[in-house]
Amino acid sequence: MLTTISTRRSEAPSIPASVPQSDNEQRGRDLGVAASIGWRLVREAHWDGQRCNWIGASMELRPAGWQAVERSFGPDLYAGTSGIAVFLARLYALTGEACFARTAQGAMSQALSRFDRFEGPLGHGFYAGSWGVVWAAREVGSMVADGALVEWAADRVRLGLHADLSAAPTDLIGGAAGAIGALLDLEGESKDGSATALALRYGEHLLSKSRADGDGMVWDTMEQGVLAPLCGLGHGVAGIAWSLLELAQATGDGRFREAARAGHRYERRLFDESRGNWPDLRDHSAFGGAAGEPSFGVAWCHGAVGIGIARERSMRLDSSDHELAREYAVAARTTAAHIHQLLDAGGADASPCHGLTAGVELLASLGEAAGDLDPRDGVSRFRTLGLTHEAEGRAWPCGVLGGGEAPGLMLGLAGIGHAFLRLADPVGCPSLLLVGPR
């Protein structure tokens, strides 16, 4: 029997006294927005025994094409229950509110009950595949002191050691690049070498699937519908190159570093100086756009936001490539201008994948003004937006085109809430936009 938990806004938690008093007002407001979103997710959860799910906006392929629908969600990290669980577990860790922990565990129980849906290529992804659920189980289990979840995650890593990787995609969202980052982070928990060994196998797979392109290196992450191998974080070279640098750092194998550098050379060649951006090389005629003309998105999945996030980490892993820092700064400037345009227009998607929050996180990572860019402006406006939405009970614009609110991580409320957690506690709440070893 499906049930929902009834809670009132008056039950929302006060901000813990442990918030440092030097920044207590601003951090308290950030945590308050995150908690308000968390309570909404708690109230709107549909329960069946020990498992819970949500109903919300999603894209679904129908005979007439992709359409926005209202539906329940799968187990994945990107839009499903495991991503919601991670947000709620981290919110519990900062607030101590038991309902957040209970709902996080219910969401993970639902994800594990659907884990067998990850077959074929889906068995290898992070945001859209099995390794995202495994990583989430470890993360949630650690946060809410659920040892069974942590042990389940460790078992899945050991079972994956001898898996057939030949069909694994290569990108960050659904393939080997995302798996590598997650596995290297999981190794920090297990420390038995199994996660790193499996990450190494995925790295070898990436090398085997690469091909030369001039002085660069590329991966064919999409079999059709592209003008050329893709740039960018979600499906392009930036995400793959970052994962190879992480693997080189973890293993000392220079082949992975050289492959990453070759990937960066490819993206560098395509950079458009006048736009301060990299092209989205998908063939948009398939979506009603102009045939043969690339666009220049400013999003986590494609364009300056995601590439900036990847460069921020990559430049720390490969300090000899000084162009990475320059590209990071350029991406941040392009992102800052885009965020102000979206906020000026009003009603912009606030979720991480192709909305505001990933760009805000990129700006927050700058920490201080860079040239004529003061990242505090865009971040401050986003904070004001959050306070207004929650104080007035407004619906958040989410990432499902033509749909309403979505509960999930990369397209909806969990991702928006997590952005405010990151603003409140960037050290205690690591990024979910690029998951690697801590």
Image (cartoon, rainbow, N blue to C red):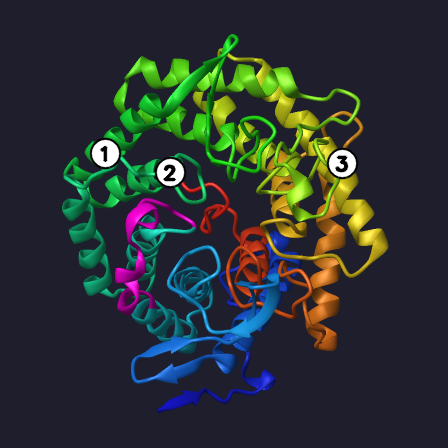
- Residue located 40% across and 65% down the image: 74
Across and down, in percent, residue 80 comes to 44, 63
* Dot in front, 3 or 1: 1
- Marks 3 and 2 sit apart, C-alpha to C-alpha, by 38 Å
Q: Earlier in the sequence, mark 2 or mark 1?
A: 2
- Marks 2 and 1 sit apart, C-alpha to C-alpha, by 19 Å
Quarter of the figure with residue 367: top right
Q: Is residue 240 left or right of residue 417?
A: left
Callout 2 secondary element? loop
Report if the CB atoms under discs 3 and 2 are less than 8 Å apart: no
Q: Residue furthest right?
A: 344
What amino acid is at disc 1?
Answer: Thr
What amino acid is at disc 3?
Answer: Asp
- Residue located 33% across and 71% down the image: 110
Which of the two residues, 141 or 53, is positioned nearer the viewer here? 53
Visible residue check, residue 218:
yes
Across and down, in percent, residue 363 comes to 66, 40
Q: Give the residue number, with chain letter if any, for mark 2.
A: 169
Q: How many marks?
A: 3
Q: Give the residue number, with chain letter if any, for mark 3.
A: 374
Q: Give the residue number, with chain letter if any, for mark 1.
A: 196
What amino acid is at disc 2?
Answer: Pro
Q: Which residues are magenta?
A: 111-127
Give the position of the C terminus as an image quadrant: top left
Which of the two residues, 81 or 432, is positioned nearer the viewer here? 81
Q: Is residue 266 left or right of residue 364?
A: left
- Label 2: few (<14), some or many (≥20) within 10 Å? many
Callout 1 secondary element? helix
Give the position of the N terminus as an image quadrant: bottom left
